Amino acid sequence: MTDTTLDIIAIGNALVDVLSPTTDAFLAEEGLTAGAMQLIDAAQATALYGRMGPGREISGGSAGNTVAGAAMMGARCAFIGQVAKDQLGEVFVHDLESQGIEFTVPAREADIPTGRCLILVSPGGERTMNTYLGAAQFLPPESVDEAQVASAKVLLLEGYLWDPAEPRAAMKAAIRMARKAGREVALGVSAVFCIMNHLDDFRALVNDGDIDILFANEEELLALSGEGDFEAAVAALAPKLPLLVATRGAEGATAVRNGERFHVAAEPVERVVDTTGAGDLFSAGYLVGHVQGRPVAECLTMGAIAAAEVISHFGARPEQDLKALIAARLG
Amino acid sequence: MTDTTLDIIAIGNALVDVLSPTTDAFLAEEGLTAGAMQLIDAAQATALYGRMGPGREISGGSAGNTVAGAAMMGARCAFIGQVAKDQLGEVFVHDLESQGIEFTVPAREADIPTGRCLILVSPGGERTMNTYLGAAQFLPPESVDEAQVASAKVLLLEGYLWDPAEPRAAMKAAIRMARKAGREVALGVSAVFCIMNHLDDFRALVNDGDIDILFANEEELLALSGEGDFEAAVAALAPKLPLLVATRGAEGATAVRNGERFHVAAEPVERVVDTTGAGDLFSAGYLVGHVQGRPVAECLTMGAIAAAEVISHFGARPEQDLKALIAARLG
């Protein structure tokens, strides 16, 4: 096995978030389920954007958020995703490259624009996501470079991207490349609807030993396992995974590694402004600890610190220096 | 004099801010003066954007920020400015219209894109602004509709826009329309370099009685008056203006109305994150109090509350409900 030159290479949706405060009344009028994520088409995106309040545009995408956070903590990262040749595409790419994250996939012509996620943020910080995938869904399998995948300790896959056909093929190819090179494969299952739409695929990935690290929240674990409660879901899935990391919001997070179980409480947060990216940044903190060879308990703490920072302001990209926050706690 | 259907109509630069944390070292490397605003061309904007860190895109523009804040506080507003037919232009227009702000100027073709302001934010919140005006500088005089100007209690002019020729002609026309209709004209002088580049013009506006309300900070007052200290500048300018509002950062703000002087302390802020828009939002709070016919002391307090909110987070558009913050204090 050759040396790695990257810590994490991620495949995910290239999206710019449009974040706007909202009210329960607006969500009800729009028929939106608070806290959920739904895919919308271009016409729906235009209509919803026209009705929602003023926004702030901040690069997003689940795996993109994770590598942005990981790079800030000092990890060497690359990202594979599809933008269009437009201003939002330039923003997305700038925000990765300016953090030293490798990004080599050429932008598509702008007939279909860069994807965006219209995020309505309730008082208290709960986010309701409406994603227009745009160019992101056309990520072609040939975007995945075998040498680049083989150069990274961990391949991180975004479950959301399992839905469209081309990126799914890209991720399947990347899994083969990573396994061949002896690298670890991490999967963030992203949302219950992803699991339900591709239940056989996700179960096969887990059962076949293709996944080394699974990141999921409680609802996602129930869906994936088919069990009715958290303990049963962990009991069913943990034996099939070298590492299972389950986030539980304000209740903290649990990891099971080779049968040993660890727990961390959530970090205190003065005011929860916007929970967008909480799971993505938890994964970032955890993975950075993981590639640094830290004990599981420290990896969990790093995840909790990164998640707490990102929910204290609008947007899923960190504002404060995560490396300094972690050094202050763990050294 | 007919009834007004608007409280404030503003003419200003249509810009989207790109806000990014920075360090003193980076400012020094780039040869930038902390706290200043400079105009840059397209090539400089591309180069600086390529070197600066990840950003967050939030609608900006000095007068645009003021009407956005004023609308949030319940004022009826309109904005006149020039965007291009591109994604940033859509963002800028959306962020105004979604607050009920009238905006009727057609977007230009996108050969010259929507303007943006690259804002580097130092630890402690000081902002250094690098503005690529783009489409904003081509605002044609015919964008100003006489009936619309006459329908507003106050015409607000952004000093920055005095630099390019077409918007300057638009603002001169708007002043004539407002005066003819018996409306008030407010000027935010924006920056010392604006005053120095057009000193005769600005002095003539004041001396000829074309300005009813002047918003300026301490340095701007010194430049405009040619005096060496704040008290001398106030003494020189106040007699020529029905209302002078001078902001002094952490030291609060002073207003002189028909010879009577008032002062307000700055509102306490837990953590100053980004001072972008502090002056613009002070003007917003003041003007809303003014059009509501409140006493000067209350207008100053409203300005201080709005300014304090906007410096507590990234970006020059308010996040918290300013109307509620003011009602909690003043009823």
Image (cartoon, coloured by chain):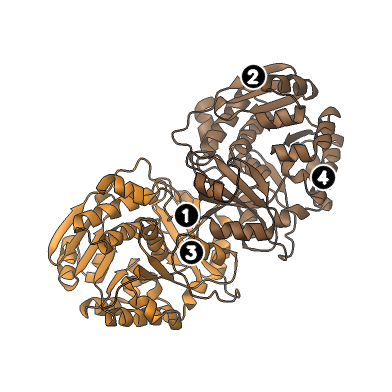
Chain colours: A brown, B orange
Q: Position of residue B59 (x, y in %)?
A: 48, 60
Look at the numbered disc 3 and give the secondary structure of its residue.
helix
Of B132 and B27, which appears nearest the observer?
B132
Say what amino acid the circle numbered 2 marks: Phe
Residue bearing the label numbered 1: B120
Of A155 and B92, which appears nearest the observer?
B92
Quadrant position of residue B146: bottom left
Q: How far is the residue under mark 2 from the one under mark 1?
A: 41 Å
Viewer-nearest of labels 1 and 3? 3
Quadrant position of residue A261: top right
Quadrant position of residue A293: top right
Q: Chain of mark 4?
A: A
Viewer-nearest of labels 2 and 1? 2
Q: How far is the residue under mark 4 from the one under mark 3?
A: 49 Å
Label 4 Cα neighbours within 10 Å, binned few <14 / some 14-19 / many ≥20: few
Q: Are marks 2 and 1 on the same chain?
A: no
- State which tag comes first along the sequence, 2 or 4: 4
**Outermost residue to the left:** B259
Residue bearing the label numbered 2: A262
Picture disc at residue B97: 3
Q: Chain of mark 2?
A: A
Q: How far is the residue under mark 2 from the one under mark 3?
A: 50 Å
Of A127 and A113, which appears nearest the observer?
A127
